[in-house]
Image (tube, rainbow, N blue to C red):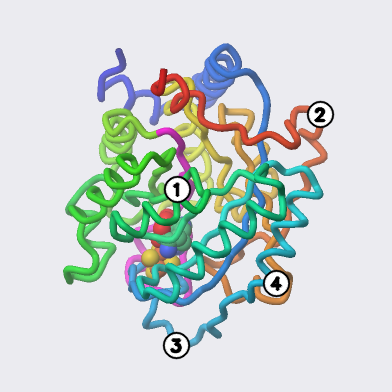
């Protein structure tokens, strides 16, 4: 059993203690689920969003963004690419849109992606908070994993980084995560690391929150300033250094691996934005999932959640550990089912 005190100590570790923590993350992963790495091709379906999260570059009130929605052909071509490249899985991600038209379109796209891969492509969705009925429809269509970060498990901080209106409610967020689970999804969550006003205690609480929520997958990474977001600009003077956010993100990954040995942990794209070796480093701390971006080139500049978003990923370094053509489901989820 790790206490909050132990976790804070690990989060504050430096030099050789920090390296030992990273090595322990790897050790725990390797003995729980092996050293394999699984791929999910990331398709950024649309940057249209009805929400206005204060940290995000594609928030609805940012007028500087050129909005887009991929066509069916563009999505299916990307899925075909993932299938033919033997990635095993895709993640379809977009802003939060609740219209019936959108829900039906996604349902259709999920079915078509299944069809073109003879049912073999694993499908993860990341499309924000939706109703239980909507989640059920997408699940029935063939999606089986869903990512919905809590962003920060500290209610006050959550309220600070989201507009003060019912559309951005901490309780609704938790409810959505619980609904996903009740529908049968493998549920992924996570947080941003190094937010202004966020303390090391908050990060320890985030890890304990993920453990308590018994999540199956985690995606978390450094908070990065976005020019299109007021929070970033107003609180820039409180921002911790890139180095701090990078190292703390890696420590968070290693500690979460120790707390939850069998879950899937993604090496986040945001890590790569700080350091070109970011995702590989994350794998070397206990992560086991990489999400190469397979969105069409011409829209990528418009899906800027934050500045300097990396455009590609070179998996050669860990090539021999990649399990091609497999879903790489969360062993944590699978062992709960038995
Ligand atoms: N709209 C969906 C999915 C797209 S946003 C959703 O919100 O769940 C996906 C993730 O991008 C968010 O969960 C958030 O953690 C991350 N993100 C947004 N802005 C960011 C920033 N400035 N720095 C780091 N991560 C950010
Ligand atoms: Fe929309 Fe997601 Fe960005 Fe919030 S984080 S503004 S829901 S895309």
Q: Is mark 3 within 8 Å of ligand 2?
A: no
Q: Is residue 101 left or right of residue 300?
A: left
Mark 2, Cα crowd under 10 Å, few <14 / some 14-19 / many 20+, is few
Q: Position of residue 70 (x, y in %)?
A: 62, 74
Q: Position of residue 64 (x, y in %)?
A: 50, 86
Q: Is residue 281 left or right of residue 18?
A: right
Compute the Cα span from label 2 to label 1. Answer: 27 Å
Q: Is residue 338 above or below residue 189?
A: above
Numbered circle sitting on residue 191: none
Q: Which residue is mark 1?
A: 146
Q: Is residue 240 above or below residue 247?
A: below
Looking at marks 4 and 2 on the same chain, the residue that comes earlier in the sequence is marked by: 4
Q: Position of residue 149 (x, y in %)?
A: 38, 50
Looking at marks 2 and 3 on the same chain, the residue that comes earlier in the sequence is marked by: 3
Q: Nearer the viewer, mark 4 or mark 2?
A: 4
> Between residues 67 and 118, which one lies in front from this camera angle?
118
Q: At numbered mark 1, what does the secondary structure look like: helix, strand or loop?
A: strand
Q: Which residue is mark 2?
A: 320
Contact between marks 2 and 1 (CB within 8 A): the answer is no
Contact between marks 2 and 3 (CB within 8 A): the answer is no
Q: Which residue is mark 4?
A: 73
Numbered circle sitting on residue 63: 3
Q: At numbered mark 3, what does the secondary structure look like: helix, strand or loop?
A: loop
Q: At numbered mark 4, what does the secondary structure look like: helix, strand or loop?
A: helix
């Amino acid at each position: 059993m790790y206490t909050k005190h132990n976790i804070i100590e690990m989060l504050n570790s430096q030099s050789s203690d920090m390296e030992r923590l990273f090595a322990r993350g790897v050790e725990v992963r390797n003995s729980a689920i092996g050293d394999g790495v699984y791929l999910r091709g990331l398709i950024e379906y649309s940057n249209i969003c009805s929400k206005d999260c204060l940290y995000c570059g594609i928030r609805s009130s940012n007028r500087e963004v050129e909005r887009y929605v991929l066509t069916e052909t563009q999505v299916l071509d990307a899925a075909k690419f993932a299938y033919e490249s033997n990635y095993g899985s895709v993640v379809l991600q977009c802003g939060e849109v609740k219209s019936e038209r959108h829900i039906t379109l996604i349902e259709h796209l999920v079915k078509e992606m299944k069809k073109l891969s003879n049912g073999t492509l694993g499908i993860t969705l990341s499309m924000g908070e939706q109703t239980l009925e909507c989640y059920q429809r997408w699940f029935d269509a063939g999606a089986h994993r869903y990512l919905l970060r809590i962003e920060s498990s500290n209610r006050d901080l959550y309220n600070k980084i989201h507009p003060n209106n019912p559309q951005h409610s901490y309780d609704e967020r938790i409810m959505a995560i619980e609904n996903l689970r009740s529908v049968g999804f493998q549920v992924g969550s996570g947080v941003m690391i190094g937010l202004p006003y966020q303390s090391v205690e908050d990060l320890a609480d985030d890890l304990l929150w993920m453990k308590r929520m018994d999540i199956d997958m985690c995606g978390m990474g450094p908070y990065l300033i976005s020019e299109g977001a007021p929070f970033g600009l107003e609180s820039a003077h409180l921002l911790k250094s890139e180095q701090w956010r990078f190292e703390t993100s890696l420590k968070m990954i290693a500690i979460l691996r120790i707390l939850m040995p069998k879950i899937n942990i993604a090496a986040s794209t945001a890590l790569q934005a700080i350091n070109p070796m970011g995702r590989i480093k994350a794998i070397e701390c206990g992560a086991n999932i990489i999400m190469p971006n397979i969105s069409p080139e011409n829209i990528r500049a418009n899906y800027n959640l934050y500045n300097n978003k990396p455009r590609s990923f070179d998996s050669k370094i860990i090539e021999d550990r990649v399990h091609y053509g497999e879903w790489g489901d969360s062993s944590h989820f699978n062992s709960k089912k038995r």
